[in-house]
Image (cartoon, coloured by chain):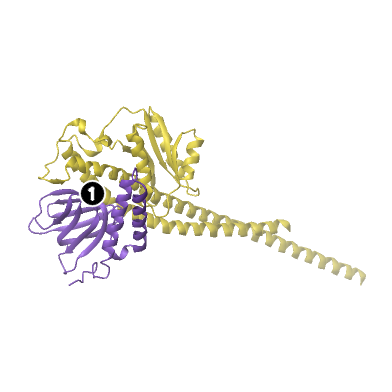
Chain colours: A yellow, B purple
Amino acid sequence: MPNVRRLVRRIETVRSLAQVTKAMELISASRMRRAQDRALAARPYAQKLQQVLEHLATAASKGADEEIHPFLRERPVSQVAIVVVASDRGLCGGYNANVVRAALGYEASLEARVRYVTVGRRAREAILGAGGQLMADFPGLPVNVTLGDAAPIARLLESAYLAGEIDAAAIAYTRFVSTMAQVPAILPILPFGRDRLAGDKPGPAIPQFIYEPEARLLLEYLLPHAVEIAVLSCLLEAAASEHSARMVAMRNATENANEMGRELVRLFNRLRQERITNEILDIAGATEAVTTLARQAG
Amino acid sequence: MARELYAEVVTAERLVYAGPVRYVSAPGVLGRLGILPGHAPLLAALRPGELRIQPLHGNGEISLAVSGGFLEVAEGRVMVLARSAERPEEIDIERARRARERALQRLRENGGIDRARALAAKERAEARLAVAAKRGVGSSSGQQL
């Protein structure tokens, strides 16, 4: 019965597939936990840095407006860089496609020439496929994202911004909400939004601070670092999202494979039963024939 | 805000230290900063170097290698935002030595563009080595003296 043999082979294939996806699910689960922990552990620093930055921006803005740091200065936007953070690999549900769609949607909303900085092979392929222009591309995120992964991206944006090659930069990444929910998001990086710094509000009553060195210089130290940290927190969020998305995708795949396996086994059992029944019928028929013949002969 | 001081050291990756302290000594860009309870509000940039913390309880001293960052003193709290902060036993001495060699090499060869970066790398490596030298002096466990 070639049909049955083929079925047996299919059952084996489906089973080993389920084993593979199960293994991938477990790997993603452990990476996901680590990535989630790191993303959460990085939040206090980013928040504190933000506070210091607000404080300094307020203190430094008491000077003349033309002395404002270039990272804080808005200018007419005709060229924009969009960083798209996706993955090197697929098998993670809509993770890659969603963030790319968000980036392209953002481009469509801008009246500026857009160039892309992609993180991850899938981002690169998708952006090129959509006719986007690349400014640079980076490999996908490692299991443990560190400042070392964020720094080159931040530096690239900063130097392009200072050189006037771009007037603004934003990151399209996937914000981590929970294991089941990740939302694509766009975060403007440069200029380092004055709105974000609440610099327009009359400064909150800052006690008489000593600045070492003076506030404007401190701000100069701080801003590049703040850009780096903003990039880093996007990468951390993206990594947590990626591993969560992959874990969930692999869990679904495992469940589907198991379900398919069960159905195939059911089919196999039915076929086997059918064959047995047929054989019994054959035997019964043959016996019947033999006894009839014997009776006639006798 | 009586005579109390609470210190927190955070890096982009984790919270390194948090607790009440007697004093904090930090490598400011304009010179070493000593922070005692009742210090005036201060915001300072840090250079690569050794950050020393004496916890309120116990009589040890914690030594951390920081590679630059910021320090804020306000309302009885010292907040250190460091690019990195490592305890002596966490430092990879070999790696720091190699980093220092590389930096020195680059400083010898190349007077131009990357000088500032090489200098910074050298400072970071030296800060690490200085802190690593305190290994086993009961630094992190606070058992000194």
Q: Is residue A70 visible?
A: yes
Q: Residue A270 at x, y = what percent?
A: 65, 59
Q: Residue A254, percent across and down?
A: 52, 56
Amino acid, disc 1: Lys
Q: Quadrant of the C terminus of chain A?
A: bottom right
Q: Residue at x 49, y 43 (%)?
A: A122
In the rendered structure, the answer to whether residue A295 lies left or right of residue B54 reads right
Quadrant of the image occupied by residue B90? bottom left
Q: How many marks?
A: 1
**Residue B51: image location, x then y, percent:** 22, 58
Q: Is residue B90 above or below residue A57?
A: below
In the image, A48 versus A222, the foreground residue is: A222
Residue A167 falls in image quadrant: top left
Quadrant position of residue A115: top left
Residue under mark 1: which chain is it in?
A
Q: Which residue is mark 1?
A: A48
- In the rendered image, which quarter contains the N terminus of chain A? bottom right
